Each structure stands twice: as structure tokens, then as C-alpha cells.
């Protein structure tokens, strides 16, 4: 059962999401919050698997600040940003807070469900146009000569692990795909993060997309 906490300042939105998610087998809304500070308190109290976090909340702490604090306090809890903003600024800021992914409020219901299921097992999720944005930025940086790439520091196996992480595979799935142990995958992942100087799985995904390791949306 995927336990979900909703954090959104609009009661109508929360009601609709609750009805939708509770109708999905294997998914349950265990709590609701109207702003970031309340979301943090509920997260500590309920320890949900996934927090569906609204980005813009005019009262109290916004979604970005709340996400950053939750990731510091409860790194095992996965935060999925729900936003109406389809632009680079919000996307990059969301990733840097440690969010496991972003999904647009205009997305179809089945995409939202897939996104929640994906982040609940430790994978990352970016809506398709977000992937294009990151790719575009990477290409533009190359044109400007901005390339502080450390990709060459990775071993062939570490590059394989990085690519599979970015494609949304869990540690167990990566282990099965590469015929290695889960602990070995975790060791490779730790070394990749150290070499690339990133701290979270979403940052690894951002790096992989900018590097051009993916040819499709996550």
C-alpha cells in the first residue's frame, strides 16, 4: 500500500485528488495539509511513502521550502511536486530541494498515478517537457563552452548504473538487469554521486538528462 500525504491550499483540489487516489488499488491518502509548515508536521507524524506537494501556496511555507526541510528531516519520504508551472526556473529549483520528481497539474490522471508509483519505490519522475528543458540547457551550455563534466571519471559499470537510475529503475531492478547484488548497486551509486558531486537521486537524473544519456521522458 502506497501511503500518500496531500499538501495543497485548495480544498477542492485535495478532495479531487483524495477521491482519485483512494480509488486506485494499492494506494491510500493518509493525510492532508493546507500549507508547508502543516505538511512538515503531518509528514513527521504520519511518515507517508509519498508526499504530493503543491508548489505555490500563498499562506505559510511554500512547497519548495517545505520539501527541502522534509528531505533533511525524513530522507526516506519521497516528495512529488505538483505544479502548474512548466518552466525551467521552477523545475531546477524543485530538483535542487531534493524532490523525487515533478508532475503538472494539467497531467492526465493515469500519469499522476504512474508518477506516484514511480517515486514510491525510489525512482525519479519528470514530465516529458521537463526532460526536453534539461536537454536544451545542456546543449546550450555546450555551445557556450560551459562543460565542467566529470563523466569521464566514471567507470563503465558506474555509467551503466547511472543511466539505469535515470531511466527510473530501482536498485533491485538494476541489480537484476546487470546480474549483480543490490549492495553492489548501492556501492556503485554512492561512488557515482561522490564523483559527480551530487547528493540526491533526482540530481543524478538531472545530470543524466543534461548529459544526453536518455532519449525519452522519464
Image: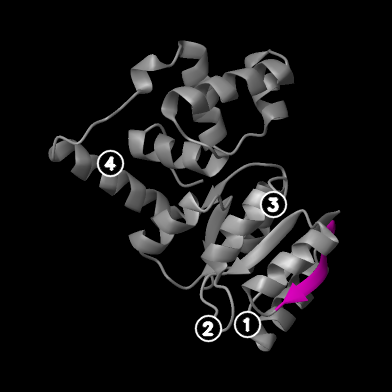
Query: How far, Cα to Cα, is label 3 from label 4?
Result: 32 Å
Cβ atoms under marks 1 and 2 closer than 8 Å: yes
Q: Residues within 10 Å of mark 3 (few under 14, many from 20)?
A: few
What residue is pinned by disc 3? 73
What residue is pinned by disc 1? 9
The location of residue 36, given as percent across then percent down, is 63, 72
On the picture, is 100 further left or further right than 150?
Answer: right
Mark closer to the chain start, 1 or 4: 1
Mark closer to the chain start, 1 or 2: 1
Query: What residue range appears in magenta?
Result: 25-33
The location of residue 165, given as percent across then percent down, is 56, 32
Circle 4 SS class: helix
For this rendering, which residue is in front, 195 or 116? 195
Q: Residue at x 56, y 68 (%)?
A: 63
Cβ atoms under marks 3 and 2 closer than 8 Å: no
Mark closer to the chain start, 1 or 3: 1
Query: Which of the numbered marks, if any, corresponds to residue 138?
Result: 4
Query: Which of the numbered marks, if any, corresponds to residue 58?
Result: 2
Query: How far, Cα to Cα, is label 1 from label 4?
Result: 35 Å
Mark closer to the chain start, 2 or 4: 2
Query: How far, Cα to Cα, is label 1 from label 2?
Result: 8 Å
Q: Using the image, determine if residue 142 lies above or below residue 117.
A: above
Query: How far, Cα to Cα, is label 2 from label 4?
Result: 33 Å
Amino acid at each position: 500500500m502506497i501511503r500518500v500525504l496531500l499538501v495543497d491550499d485548495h480544498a477542492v483540489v485535495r478532495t479531487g485528488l483524495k477521491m482519485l487516489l483512494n480509488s486506485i488499488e494499492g494506494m491510500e491518502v493518509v493525510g492532508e495539509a493546507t500549507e508547508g509548515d502543516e505538511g512538515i508536521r503531518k509528514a513527521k507524524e504520519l511518515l507517508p511513502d509519498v508526499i504530493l506537494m503543491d508548489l505555490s501556496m500563498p499562506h505559510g511555507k511554500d512547497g519548495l521550502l517545505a520539501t527541502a526541510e522534509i528531505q533533511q528531516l525524513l530522507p526516506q519520504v519521497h516528495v512529488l511536486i505538483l505544479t502548474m508551472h512548466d518552466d525551467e526556473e521552477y523545475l531546477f529549483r524543485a530538483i535542487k530541494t531534493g524532490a523525487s520528481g515533478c508532475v503538472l497539474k494539467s497531467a492526465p490522471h493515469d500519469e499522476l498515478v504512474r508518477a506516484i508509483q514511480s517515486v514510491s519505490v525510489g525512482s525519479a519522475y519528470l514530465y516529458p517537457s521537463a526532460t526536453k528543458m534539461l536537454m536544451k540547457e545542456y546543449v546550450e551550455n555546450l555551445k557556450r563552452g560551459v562543460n565542467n563534466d566529470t563523466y569521464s571519471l566514471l567507470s563503465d559499470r558506474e555509467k551503466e548504473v547511472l543511466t539505469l537510475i535515470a531511466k527510473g529503475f530501482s536498485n533491485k531492478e538494476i541489480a537484476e538487469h546487470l546480474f549483480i547484488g543490490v549492495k553492489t548497486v548501492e556501492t556503485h551509486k554512492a561512488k557515482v554521486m561522490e564523483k559527480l558531486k551530487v547528493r540526491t537521486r533526482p540530481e543524478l537524473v538531472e545530470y543524466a538528462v543534461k548529459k544526453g544519456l536518455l532519449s525519452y521522458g522519464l
